[in-house]
Amino acid sequence: MDEWSLSLTSEKHLAPSTIRSYQGDVLMFSEFLIDGRYGWGPACEEAFGTFPVAICHEWNTIAHLNDYEGDPEAKPFSREQLQLFLDYADEQVERAVRSKRKGALAAYRDATLFKVIYGWGLRRTETSKLDLVDFGRNPQARQFGRYGTLNVRYGKAKKGQPPRRRNVLSVMDWAVDAVADYVENVRPRFGFPDHPALWITERGGRLQPGSINDRFEAYRDALKLPKELVPHSLRHSYVTHLTEDGVDRRFIQQQVGHECDSSQAIYTHVSDDFMNTSLHKALAPAFAGS
């Protein structure tokens, strides 16, 4: 439903009245399926081992699609693209170290920064303004040590209001390992121990969002990845990939700081492979004997 609704708005650019009509048709059909008077629930249980559920909700229908906070053209990475991008960032560190040229520390910082944006589902500005003290422990995830939670102090503000804060729980062990290694072994080599920023420049300043964007674009273009991929795509990918992995939508909503699920519905671009696999699993029992 999310993928289809997104395609109607950002790809086909249909009029709101048309989309509302299409969604209304799906709504009526799904209500017919789940209405106990027609017996489709028990019939589906017997045929498929599962039952129909409502898929049209307040948060993913046209009346609420305009609550989306970002650019719908900022597509998420596929898992393969993401791995390629992060591997390339790591390769730049290795090349700088092998050639003994200036910039190895900055390359390591940026490779870690991209992992943090994805690993905690952050915006670019939120990432730039992180301080060392923003990481903390989570008693429910002791394996992450002092990196169990991330206090985002400069979340996107509503108009006329101060930045919104949120705590993001760490969920990806490899991302925790990456930032822990950076903080403990790499950042001290910049030589500014009293600077509060997590990401600092070689001259002792705080890394700015524009610099994040420049490095991202350089890596993206070197790999010949689509221009639609921007730093915000890493945040989209966090939402999409957790959704594909079956993580509870309410938990993801809290992690990324969405007040309502409408924003998240447009953030979620589950892959065709995921959709096809899910559909195949749902329909396979019905066609097993055909």
Image (cartoon, rainbow, N blue to C red):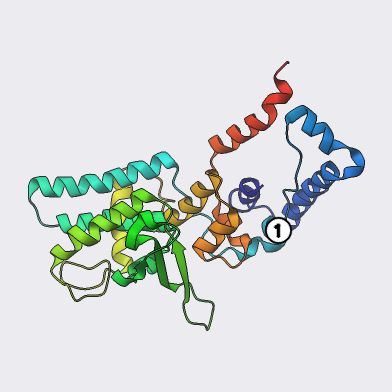
Mark 1, Cα crowd under 10 Å, few <14 / some 14-19 / many 20+, is many
Please give the name of the residue rendered at 52% of the width and 44% of the height, measured from the top-left corner.
245
> In the image shown, does 85 or 281 lie closer to the viewer?
281
Residue 85 locus on image (x, y percent):
33, 45
Please, which residue is most extreme toward the left here?
A: 100
Please, which residue is most extreme toward the right here?
A: 37
Please give the name of the residue rendered at 92% of the width and 43% of the height, measured from the top-left corner.
37
**Residue 230, can we see it?**
no
Q: Determine whether 47 is above or below 155 in the image.
A: above
> In the image shown, does 32 or 221 lie closer to the viewer?
32
> Image check: 257 left or right of 176?
right
> In the image shown, does 77 or 175 lie closer to the viewer?
175
Residue 51 locus on image (x, y percent):
76, 38
Which quadrant is home to the C terminus? top right
> Image check: 24 left or right of 241?
right
**Figure quadrant of residue 204:** bottom left
Instruction: Name the residue beneath numbered marker 1.
Output: 62
Residue 114 locus on image (x, y percent):
33, 55
Q: Determine whether 257 is above or below 118 in the image.
A: below
Q: Amino acid at mark 1?
A: Ile
> Image check: 224 left or right of 189?
right
Residue 131 locus on image (x, y percent):
31, 71
**Figure quadrant of residue 189:** bottom left
Please, which residue is most extreme toward the bottom here?
A: 160
Secondary structure of the residue carrying numbered label 1 = helix
**Figure quadrant of residue 112:** bottom left
**Residue 134, can we see it?**
yes
Q: Determine whether 126 is above or below 145 in the image.
A: below
Count of numbered circles in the view: 1
Please give the name of the residue rendered at 59% of the width and 38% of the height, measured from the top-left corner.
275
